[in-house]
Structure formats: C-alpha cells, structure tokens
Image (cartoon, rainbow, N blue to C red):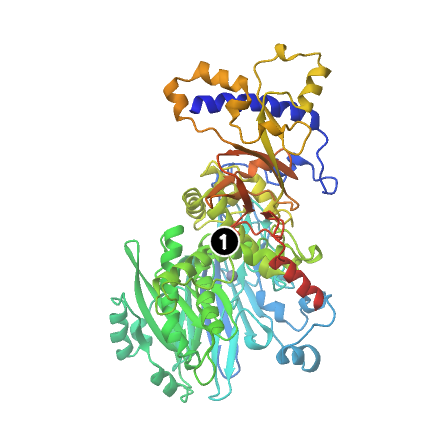
Amino acid sequence: MNKVKYCIASVLFLMGAVVMAQEEGDVKTEREPGHYNQSRFKQLYEEFATPNTYRSASGAPGPDYYQQQADYAINVQLDDKNAKINGEETITYHNNSPDDLEFLWVQLDQNVRAKDSKSPLRDGNGVNIAYTAGNFAETFISEPFDGGFNIEWVKDASGKPLSYTINQTMMRVNIPQPLKSGEKLSFSVKWWYNIPDHTVNRARSGYEYFEKDGNRAYVIAQFFPRMAVYSDVEGWQNHQFWGSGEFALPFGNYDVSITVPADHVLDGTGVLQNREEVFSKEMMKRYKQAVKSYDKPVIIVNQQEAEAAEKGFATDTKTWKFKATNVRDYAFATSRKFIWEMQAVKIGSKDVMAVSLYPKEGNPLWEELSTRAVVQTLKTYSEHTFDYPYHKAISVHAKNQGMEYPMICWNYGRPNEDGTYSDRTKFGMISVIIHEVGHNFFPMIVNSDERQWGWMDEGLDTFMQYLAEQDFGTNNPSVIAPNEKYPSRRGNPADIVPYMGGDQKYISPIMSNPENVYQLGPNAYGKPATALNILRETVMGKELFDHAFKTYAQRWMFKHPTPEDFFRTMEDASAVDLDWFWRSWFYTTDYVDIGVKGVKKYYVSSKPTKEMEKYMADRNLTEADLPPLVYLAEEESEDFMPELKGKSPTETSQNLKEFMMDNMTEAERSQVKEPKYFYEITFDKPGGIPMPLIVEYTYADGTKENVTYPPEIWRKNDAEVKRVISSQKELVGIVVDPKLETADVDTTNNSWPKKEEKSDFDKFKENIKGK
Ligand SMILES: [Zn+2]
C-alpha cells in the first residue's frame, strides 16, 4: 500500500512541477511590496548579535562569560513619624570584567520623584480621559512631592570623600584610579529621602496611610543607592529610570540592618539573623510549628494582636538584621498593622517557607488565599525551571500594588470594608500573587535586563503565571469547581486578538524598550505570554518546549541573559527552527489571519488536461514520449467529462490500472480502497504571521479528520497555498484553526462553506468605532 501511494505521489509531483513552472513569478498577493516570500523564513543573522566567547551561538553562556558582583552592608532607620528613610551603606564592587573601569555608575531610582525630575516633563499625550483624584491634585493643585535621594556624602574605604556627579537617576562615582580588571573596591554612601505615598502616585514602593487608626504600612524598595550593571552587552547599563523600564541589577551578598519602631512586624529579603531578639516568645513558638506545617499556614501574629498593636505607637525601636546571598536587590515591608503567617513547602529536597503579611484590611481574602497562591507558584515554577533556591517567598498585601523583589513582593486584592468581595477582586489577587512571586524566577534569578527588555521578565513570567493559575485551579476545588478552569486573563490565544488586530499606530514589536510603547500591558506581558503558550501547545508541543524552556532557565539561572540567549536556546535544545516565529511575533507588529479561500472538485481521467496538452504542444511531445500518466480533471473546467463521475480511479485510468497490476499482488489489490473524491483546497493568509495550518475536515457521514500542516507550508508562498486531498467520502466542511489556538484575528474566513456570522473581532472593531 505504501509503495503504490509513493509512486502515484511521484507522478503527481511531476504535474506539480509543470504547474509550478507556469505560475512562478505570477503569485498574486495583496501585500504591500517588500513582503516577499522567503523573508519570513530567513534566519535572523542580521537581527541577532554575533555570537562570541561571552555568549555562545547555542544560547549558553560562553567560556569567557563574566558578571560583576556588588556586595552591600546597609544600615537604615525608618522615621515613622516623618515617613523618612535614613541610611548608610558600604558597597564592595568586584570588577570581574576584562576591562579597567574609570568610574562607577550607581542608580538613584528615588530621583524619579525628585522635585526637579524630568519624568513628568516628557509626557506629550495632552489631557487624560480621566484622572484619579490623587493624581489630579498632584498634577494641578498641590506642591510637587519632595522625593529623591539626598546624598550626604560618598567616601572611599579610608573615609576620604569621593567626588561624584548626579545625572537624574544616575550617579557617577569618580574614582581617582581606574578599578582594574579582577580587582574590587569598597566605598560608602550616606543618604536620606522622604517616602512617597504609593497609593497616590503609583510608586513601586512607599507607604499607605490608614486614616482610621493613624498607621502606615510600608513596602520599601529602591531605598538605597544601587550599583548599575556592567556587562559584555551594554557596558554600563546607565539608561535613566524614567518610570516604565524597570531595573537592571548585579548579583551580590547583602548584610542589612533595619531599625523600625519596636511594635512593628517586619520581613524582607534574606535570612533573619536575630529572630530571638525581635520575636516574642509566643511568636517563636508559633514559628517553630510553621516550619513543620506543610498542609496549612501557621499564624505568627494574628489579627487580634495586630489590631492591639495598631493603637500602640511605640517610641522605642528594634533592629531587624538580615543576610542574603546571591540576590540582585533588597526590599522589606514593615508596619504595626501586619498579620503574619507561614507555611512550609517541599521543593525538591528542600523546605521553603511560603509567607504572607497583610493588614486586617486584607481579610477575609488574604487569610484564605494568599499563602495558597504562594505555595502553588513555588511548585509550578520550580517544575518548569529549577528548584526555587531561596529559603522563603513572601507575599505582602499593599493597596493597588503589584511589584516584585527577591523573596518578597507587594500585591493588591482588597475586599470591601464589610468583608465582601467580587470574583474580580479574588481572582485578581490570586493572579497578582502568582505573578509577583513568580518574578523570583524571572528576573530575580534568571536576571535579564528589565530596563532594556521588559518582555524578558514580564512575558516569561506571565506565560508561567498562566500555567500556575491553571494548576491552582486544578488543586483548589474550593476555589475552582472540578469541571471549571481558572479564569486566566492572559495566555489564551483568543485574548490577544483585540490587541494584535488593533490600530497599528499604537502597537510596537515585542522587541521594544518599555519606555517607548503605548500599550505596555499587551506589549510586554500579554503578547509574549500568548506567543510562548502557542509555541508550547501548537508549534513545538509540550515535551520539546518544556525541555528547551527549562534548559534556558537553568543555563541562565543567577546570570544575565539577552533575548538572543533565549531565542537561541529554544532552538538549540529542540531542533525546531523558530527564526520565523521570533521574527514575526517578536520583531514585527504583524498578526495572524489564515483562512480557507476555495475548494475545487476533481476526477481521475486518462485524457490529458488542457494544461497538459499545452505543455506537450510547447515542447513537441506526444503521450508516447512520456511515462504513463494519470490526470485529475476539475469538475468546473473543460477537462471534465460526465462519464468520470461516480467511477473509481482504476476504472477511468488505464495507466493506473496497469501500474497496479504490475506492482501489486492480487491479495494486495483486493485490500486497496480507492478514493472516490479528490479536492484541491486553497488556503490564504491575509495576516503577516506564518503559523501552522490547522485544519478540520468534515465528511458527509459526519466523521472529522484533523490535519496540522507545519508553518513551513508558507515558506515559498506567503499569501496562498493549495492542498490536494483524496477521500472515499464526500467532503462537506472545512474549518481552519477550529480550537482557536493561533490568535487568528479574523475568523470569518476560517470556514468552508463560508459562515455568515460575524467574528468576535468584527464585533470588537465595531464596538471600538462606536466609542
Ligand atoms: Zn511583572
């Protein structure tokens, strides 16, 4: 059977070649010039940086890969009454690069909120559709907030003043002699700043003030001058912090002492060094239970105790001491309002503590769900990347926040005052906790440059978030009923359609700097997450994808990857050529739109078709000059003869009959089921992105057949391809992408016969026009 099929295929191939010869150069496409065919499958040599000894062509770190190290000894005091931070630090900077450094760049992120900050001045959008009351007051009524670092001094290791130059959010430390390759240098900085109210201006850290009890809850980050990254890719990454492009930070070891009012509860990055000093006896007792509690959280400070503490306003202080190894940043949360709970999670052979910290305003949601979300995140992410290497992961409740730091993050999700809450609040809270805890993996450990490439952490994290949300749904039947799915907001292909099919004026390629795009949410989060989901489910398959993704995470764990390192590793570990995918999804603003254009019916004939007659005439050939041929005559053409209808191919083609007699035994021939129906189906691709062509064929007896043609089907003709299919049953329907796997922006052209209903995309477009 296989042999016969092969031989018929080779005859058809000859005909294919004839047709190709005629049509070459005559491919009709509605695309604008420049979109020539092969461009989409061209390798990315021009877009990618040339591999070198720092970064290999495989996508792995090269033999000369290096990264800098910045160690910090930090001592800060919180002035709760005035909402101020005072601090002093010694930075020890290790120059592991092959270069001698003439100066050092230090990041002063708080300066984005300085009175003379240039950030508000570069906004060119005119009047907003709406302002929050706080934002309106800040913009038009009140004095600008007096934020920003006040640097008191910078000194070298011997205590001598070092000269420095501040340019907006960057400080150049002018060291007297270059810091030689392989050497290290220590210097100290003293500073203070006014802590912003993060609920007013959406700062990534600050305090929330609770009017009813007069307390503040602090979530503190970017609170100390931090070293910029120096690397083989950027040199110094000293691109200013304008507000949207997040952070680029080197790894290092931290020794941090934080002094706060004695009645505060505090947690932060790193291992607490003086637990017995800062915990009460009761807290110590509960903590020892928590360390062994794998099934549910143990409350360390309960709501009653937190509410009692709210009234205290201690004037004495306590100092909390932490050490953190191999982290890229430091953050902490502190308040006398905090309720505190912990649960142990087994990750590989290690115990990790899942921790939640929240004021009573977070309940009842937080005591029910926060720690559970942390636990699921650690499990799902570890399974797909590497075992979570730190000893704890803390979820802190802070109004309107969603922000990540090593081992600790701030998350929104606040019930109404009477304790009721909507599904939107509940699922928003679970999702943000998964997302922010998930950032421990990307970018806190797989330490990409957020300042330059927002999608490298946000996109990968949002993709993983989708997987963790689905796992959370499966593992928490009290939240998601067994027959239902977790309502993920991002990751499903259909959810990105309104963005990708939207106004091109407001869309940028994923490969853009976060400061320069209109819609950062879909650009850096939704689209890359969806792209990876499609890559996993539809293009590569889970097995190949998961192995490659894990390879990337493990290669770049505790290192600084670039986009190429990711793109290259995904191919290197899977043997799937993905240049077309990266090119179209990450480097362009193209969208997916694939449809079925038409179907032609054919019958087997022994008479040369008109096309074949012309071919022979042009070359002075007769049938005797050619091998025995079989022809397919199209029903709607001059080639068609009514007597072909209803006959089997061997009845209408003597050549085919003879071939089978010569090449098959009688027993084999009796087994053959000859196809009766032949169709040529034209698929077209109005969208720019080539994707696998996923087709569902339906036959007259109701049976269905699903075929996925690889994306390479578009490699020669980017606009239109034709497939010939044969069957014993009549074909009655064709649907392209029946399960909506590809983010196809227009599904009105996905069916044959054409359906008259409007696509969601059309409805969406009409809605937009109406507004
Ligand atoms: Zn994020």
Q: Position of residue 649 (x, y in %)?
A: 52, 25
Identify which residue, 746 or 397, lies in the foreground: 746
**Dot 1, crowdedness within 10 Å: few (<14), some or many (≥20)?**
many
- Near-viewer residue (600 or 34): 600
Residue 505 visible in the shown view:
yes
Q: Residue at x 71, y 56 (%)?
A: 505
588 left or right, relative to 672? right
Quarter placement of the N terminus: top left
Displayed quadrant of residue 125: bottom right
* Disc 1 secondary structure class: helix
The CB of the residue at mark 1 lies under 8 Å from ligand 1 = no
Q: Position of residue 554 (x, y in %)?
A: 41, 47
Q: Quadrant of the C terminus?
A: bottom right
Q: Is residue 71 visible?
A: no
Q: Quadrant of residue 664?
A: top left
User: Looking at the image, which residue is at 40% across and 73% down?
Assistant: 357
Q: Quadrant of residue 272?
A: bottom left
Residue 509 x/y as whole percent: 63, 51
> Which residue is the site of mark 1?
460
- What residue is at 70 percent from the left and 34 percent from the top? 27
Left or right, 740 with respect to 392, comes to right
Where does the image place residue 395, in percent across and percent down from the top left? 42, 68
